[in-house]
Image (cartoon, grey):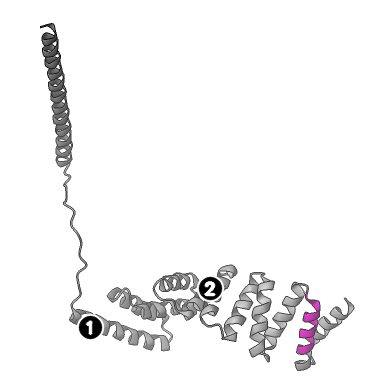
Amino acid sequence: MIYVLVFVSSFVGICIIVCTRLLLRQRFVRRFVRNVRQRFQSVEERGGKMFQETKIQKPQKNPRVSAMELQQVRSLLREAERAEAQGKYEEVERLLIQALTVQPHAYEVKAQLAKLYLTTNRESKAEAMYKELLQEHDDMSFHANLGLSYYRQGKYVEACYAYQEALKRDPKNPERASILGRACIAAGHFEEAVPLLEKATMSLSRDMELLHLLAECYLQIGEHEKGEATYRKINKVEPYNEEVKEKLLSLARA
């Protein structure tokens, strides 16, 4: 009998505990929901609105509209070419920017605008345009022109990297090698300039300016024998060049 009473009392106690926990949980849930509703209500009172998320679909252009835009861009480009021939560079810039408002991703328009900035000595704008172009089109001329914009701003190390990318895409062109070599000299990287100038002078052997640069690079890196040999080569072509004669005399005395 005692065991029955203990069992019943224990069962009743457990039921009371479970019911109490359920009531507390429901109370907590109701309090949480009430707090959330109050927050939403306070937002609405302040004039706020809740918007349902919707997927934005990019509208497809009507082919007829695209053709009209293309025709408009071509017309603006022709006007820009006529203005450029007359030296009206401000007008050219205005027309090209107008063309970009019609077709923002027209890379040929961006290329012409970047070239305009470069030819009118606005190198920082040209730099920005060529960087943007290279994100979309890996073109050798864009790398080369970016290098030129860097070079004119005195950013010689950056110019070296840009010219190097242009040379990678046109490795057989000696002009590319010579331009990169000049940039390396401007950056003070004479050891890197030497093989580039050597490569360039193999095809441009009559370019005395390149030979002068190569001879100076040899002297800078301590290759005096190669420097003297290069100056002798120059002396054969320019026997009356007094500066070369003085260089040869000083090297002979050293």
- Specify start and end residues of the magenta stretch as a single range: 223-233
Q: How many marks?
A: 2
What residue lies at 78% left-to-right and 90% top-to-bottom?
A: 235
Would you say 126 lies left or right of 186 here? left
Instruction: Report the residue that reaches farthest toward the right.
Output: 253
- Provide the residue designation for mark 1: 67
Tell me the quarter of the image containing the C terminus: bottom right
What residue lies at 41% left-to-right and 83% top-to-bottom?
A: 88
Q: Is residue 91 visible?
A: no
Q: Which label belongs to residue 162?
A: 2
As for residue 112 lying within the magenta part, the answer is no
Q: Position of residue 54 (x, y in %)?
A: 18, 57
Q: Position of residue 251 (x, y in %)?
A: 84, 79
Residue situated in front as seen by the camera: 1 or 87: 1
Q: Place residue 57 in its image quadrant.
A: bottom left
The reply to whether dot 1 and dot 2 touch (C-beta < 8 Å) is no
